[in-house]
């Protein structure tokens, strides 16, 4: 019997990256193997995550806002950030979400659109993991069309009065600062809101069957009084939050490949050791067909992520290209997880193995940061020039 190869060996994946990128990947992989994988099944079952402790550890490693320049951020290239997201999600989607929301949404929003005062106040602490952030855009009745948000901010002298609510907010109950998007008379504006501000409340979302090792919240703003300096001056339109979402979606393009890889590795190990009819499951043709198809799909997704990383590092990437990556890779990972789950039979539904956890998590990843349907229409618009989701009249 020949020596089994890792699925990525079929593509010589490591040859696509330089030494620094591989070193960053290996550091994050070791962290996930040592610190996350031994415990994450229990965290998922308990619906808990030691987010603050983990944030401090990851901050000391330079992982929070790692692709941003200055203010205590590591300033790595986009490909290195992608590889880190891949390894984090190989541990759990909730862990990668913690890092994505911190760095690509909350920190990036302040870094890109905030005032110098806001940057100096928050970014160094957030990069170190001393302060956690969340990003308030989605609402219960305004998901795929954020322009329909009801959250608003009105002037009262020099101050702003913020009212409304946000839903499905990662890190909401543990955040020290929230980036909140609201309608104003100047357009859609982002506000940097310390979570200890009177009138700010976070309600924990319970009874989740997905992303259980992640904090999900509803944010409520009841006449939250903010100084004029709370408003981010860099943008007054949907361009602000949508630019941030592109950053987060880019991380997902890579992250889901990590979840798929972990499922394949688990399925290979299981089928090589589990015997039926006096032979390992891996010796059956149907098993090998499934493993081959899963590995090729994951390898192709890895090539796509790597190409998008190179485009992003060259400052040439476009939003519709990120939609291609998110749509393809999230769908691929969910399909791989489902197939891998079936290969483990009854064992596949237990938290003794990571696959059912990845599968449940990926149901959320398939939907958030732009649903599969919306990314389909973004690609469709790029191909036809027609925005199929716009100008609808009830």
Image (spheres, rainbow, N blue to C red):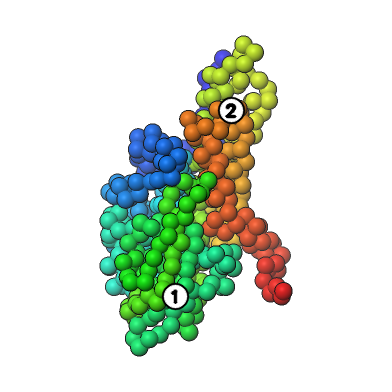
Q: Is disc 1 placed on a helix, strand or loop?
A: strand
**10 Å neighbourhood of mark 2: few (<14), some, or many (≥20)?**
few
Residue that appears at 71% across and 65% down: 384
Residue that appears at 31% across and 66% down: 196
Of residue 241 and residue 143, the one placed in the foreground of this image is: 143
- Measured as percent of width and height from the top left, residue 283 is found at 62, 18
Marks 1 and 2, how far apart in space? Answer: 49 Å
| Quadrant showing the C terminus | bottom right
Of residue 44 and residue 130, the one placed in the foreground of this image is: 44
Count up the numbered dots: 2
**Which numbered tag is attached to residue 236?**
none
**Which numbered tag is attached to residue 163?**
1
Residue that appears at 53% across and 46% down: 209
Q: Is residue 23 left or right of residue 185?
A: left
Q: Quadrant of residue 149?
A: bottom right
Of residue 199 and residue 144, the one placed in the foreground of this image is: 199
Q: Is disc 2 placed on a helix, strand or loop?
A: helix
- The answer to whether any part of residue 334 appears in the image is yes
The residue labelled by disc 2 is 346
Are discs 1 and 2 less than 8 Å apart at CB?
no
Q: Is residue 200 left or right of residue 379?
A: left
- Measured as percent of width and height from the top left, residue 307 is found at 53, 50
- Measured as percent of width and height from the top left, residue 133 is found at 37, 60
Q: Earlier in the sequence, mark 1 or mark 2?
A: 1
């Amino acid at each position: 019997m020949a020596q089994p190869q890792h699925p990525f060996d079929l593509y010589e994946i490591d040859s696509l990256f330089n030494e620094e990128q591989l070193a960053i990947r290996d550091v994050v992989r070791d962290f996930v193997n040592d610190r996350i994988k031994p415990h994450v099944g229990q965290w998922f079952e308990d619906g808990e995550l030691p987010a603050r402790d983990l944030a401090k550890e990851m901050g000391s490693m330079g992982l929070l806002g790692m692709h941003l320049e200055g203010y205590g951020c590591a300033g790595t290239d986009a490909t290195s950030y992608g590889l880190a997201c891949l390894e984090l999600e190989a541990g759990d989607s909730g862990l990668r979400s913690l890092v994505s929301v911190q760095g690509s949404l909350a920190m990036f929003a302040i870094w890109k659109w905030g005032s110098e005062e806001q940057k100096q106040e928050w970014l160094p602490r957030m990069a170190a993991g001393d302060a956690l952030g969340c990003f308030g855009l989605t609402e219960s009745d305004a998901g795929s069309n954020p322009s329909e948000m009801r959250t608003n901010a009105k002037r009262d002298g020099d101050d702003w009065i913020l009212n409304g609510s946000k839903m499905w907010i990662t890190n909401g109950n543990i955040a020290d600062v929230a980036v909140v998007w609201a309608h104003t008379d100047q357009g859609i504006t982002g506000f940097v809101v310390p979570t200890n501000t009177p009138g700010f409340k976070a309600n924990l979302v319970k009874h989740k069957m997905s992303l259980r090792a992640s904090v999900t919240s509803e944010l409520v703003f009841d006449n939250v009084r903010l100084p004029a300096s709370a408003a981010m001056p860099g943008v007054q339109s949907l361009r602000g939050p949508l630019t941030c979402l592109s950053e987060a979606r880019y991380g997902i393009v890579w992250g889901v490949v990590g979840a798929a890889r972990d499922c394949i590795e688990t399925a290979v190990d299981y089928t090589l050791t589990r015997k039926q009819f006096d032979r390992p499951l891996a010796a059956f043709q149907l098993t090998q067909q499934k493993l081959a198809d899963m590995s090729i799909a994951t390898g192709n997704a890895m090539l796509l992520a790597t190409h998008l990383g190179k485009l992003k590092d060259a400052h040439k990437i476009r939003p519709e290209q990120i939609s291609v990556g998110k749509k393809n890779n999230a769908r691929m990972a969910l399909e791989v997880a489902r197939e891998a789950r079936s290969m483990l039979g009854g064992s596949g539904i237990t938290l003794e193995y990571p696959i059912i956890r990845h599968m449940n998590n990926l149901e959320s990843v398939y939907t958030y940061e732009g649903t599969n349907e919306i990314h389909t229409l973004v690609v469709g618009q790029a191909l036809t020039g027609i925005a199929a989701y716009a100008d609808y009249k009830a």
